[in-house]
């Protein structure tokens, strides 16, 4: 009986090891953010001193169309932060023609190249917030949960953040500024977040990923890589200021009554006021609890 159990262990151990090793051929992805003494300007130009000192993220793997192959075009991403926000810079090299499309915020991703970054700031491997920008500077943002990032997620959430993009001869660039007030994380002195970075090249129907997972494996938030180096940051207050303008005009129209020969004047007026509406970002706080 003992010899049978020993034989079974000898046979089952290599099989289990093989199954575990076959799960993914790409090691877990990790990146480091650096603190910026002076925050970069969000203008699409990556010439700020903060970017020069930041570590470069440059290993991206295709999920489509050639699953497991390196990205067809080089991608360089840097992440820095200060006391108020986290900043992202991406240089997206391209030997072909950059595909861009103008549209409203949260427009469909079809017909354009995109850069997207997602943070699981609680590092619970359940919920993440994604920020997208295309070469025209159009923004998308969404909240999503679980094991898939293929869908749009909850596009109803509109965070307060900035982005800029610029098309260059050898590709395009993107810069993002995301205030800590838009992210939910524990008030620890040292932070580790979940991180996913993706690039879409429309003409090739190509999706490349920082934290690669095969289509046959569980993906989404549980498969995110990690972002460390975040030290001494605190969540901001979830208060958004939304300025809006209401105009007023008075228009006078003069007409002649053909029967009486008299002139008649009619007036129409519209109001001119400006307001600053404030609201608390309650929606994000609710789904993170």
Image (cartoon, helix red, strand yellow):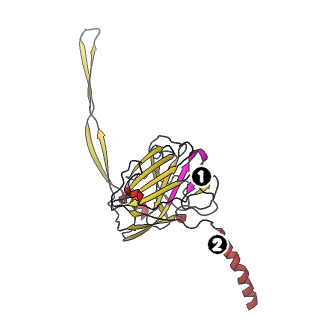
Judged from the image, the secondary structure of the residue bearing numbered disc 1 is loop
Judged from the image, the secondary structure of the residue bearing numbered disc 2 is helix
At label 2, counting other C-alpha atoms closer than 10 Å, the crowd grade (few under 14, some 14-19, many 20 or more) is few
Residue 80 in view (yes/no): yes
Give me the residue at 36% from left, 51% from top: 41
Horizontal relation, residue 246 to residue 86: left or right: left
Horizontal relation, residue 218 to residue 159: left or right: right
At label 1, counting other C-alpha atoms closer than 10 Å, the crowd grade (few under 14, some 14-19, many 20 or more) is some
Q: Nearer the viewer, residue 289 or 1?
A: 1
Q: Nearer the viewer, residue 85 or 244?
A: 85
Residue 246 coordinates in the image, percent (x, y): 29, 38
Instruction: Give the magenta range.
Output: 196-215
Residue 25 coordinates in the image, percent (x, y): 63, 66
Q: Are marks 2 and 1 in contact (CB under 8 Å)?
A: no
Q: Rounded to the nearest whole Å, what is the CA distance between mark 2 and mark 1?
A: 29 Å
Residue 107 coordinates in the image, percent (x, y): 48, 44
Residue 215 coordinates in the image, percent (x, y): 63, 59
Q: Which mark is residue 240?
A: none
Residue 1 in view (yes/no): no
Image quadrant where one finds the N terminus: bottom right
Q: Nearer the viewer, mark 2 or mark 1?
A: 1
Horizontal relation, residue 266 to residue 51: left or right: left
Which callout, 2 or 1, points at the residue further toward the start of the chain?
Answer: 2
Give me the residue at 49% from left, 53% from top: 116
Q: Nearer the viewer, residue 89 or 251?
A: 89
Residue on which the image places disc 1: 72
Image quadrant where one finds the C terminus: bottom left
Q: What is the tally of numbered marks visible in this picture?
A: 2
Q: Is residue 240 magenta?
A: no
Residue on which the image places disc 2: 20
Q: Image height check: is 137 above or below 283? A: above
Q: Is residue 202 magenta?
A: yes
């Amino acid at each position: 009986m003992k010899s049978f159990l020993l034989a079974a262990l000898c046979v089952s151990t290599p099989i289990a090891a093989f199954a575990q090793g076959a799960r993914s051929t790409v090691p877990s992805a990790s990146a480091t953010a650096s603190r910026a003494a002076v925050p970069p300007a969000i203008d699409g130009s990556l010439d700020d001193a903060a970017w020069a000192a930041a570590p470069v993220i440059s290993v991206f793997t295709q999920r489509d169309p050639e699953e497991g192959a390196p990205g067809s075009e080089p991608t360089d991403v840097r992440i820095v932060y200060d006391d108020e926000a986290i900043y992202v810079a991406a240089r997206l090299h391209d030997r072909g023609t950059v595909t861009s499309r103008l549209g409203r915020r949260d427009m469909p991703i079809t017909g354009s190249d995109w850069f997207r970054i997602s943070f699981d700031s609680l590092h619970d491997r359940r919920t993440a917030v994604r920020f997208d920008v295309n070469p025209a500077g159009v923004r998308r943002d969404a909240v999503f949960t679980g094991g898939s990032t293929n869908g749009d997620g909850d596009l109803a959430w509109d965070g307060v953040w900035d982005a800029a993009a610029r098309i260059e001869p050898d590709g395009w660039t993107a810069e993002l500024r995301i205030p800590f007030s838009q992210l939910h994380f524990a008030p620890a002195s040292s932070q580790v977040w979940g991180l996913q970075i993706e690039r879409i090249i429309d003409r090739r129907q190509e999706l490349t990923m920082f934290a690669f997972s095969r289509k046959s494996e569980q993906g989404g938030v549980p498969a995110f890589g990690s972002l460390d180096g975040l030290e001494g940051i605190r969540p901001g207050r979830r208060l958004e200021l939304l300025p809006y303008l209401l105009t007023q005009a008075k228009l006078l129209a003069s007409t002649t009554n053909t029967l009486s020969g008299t002139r008649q004047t009619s007036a129409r007026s519209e109001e001119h006021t400006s307001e600053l509406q404030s609201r608390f970002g309650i929606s994000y706080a609710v789904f993170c609890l």
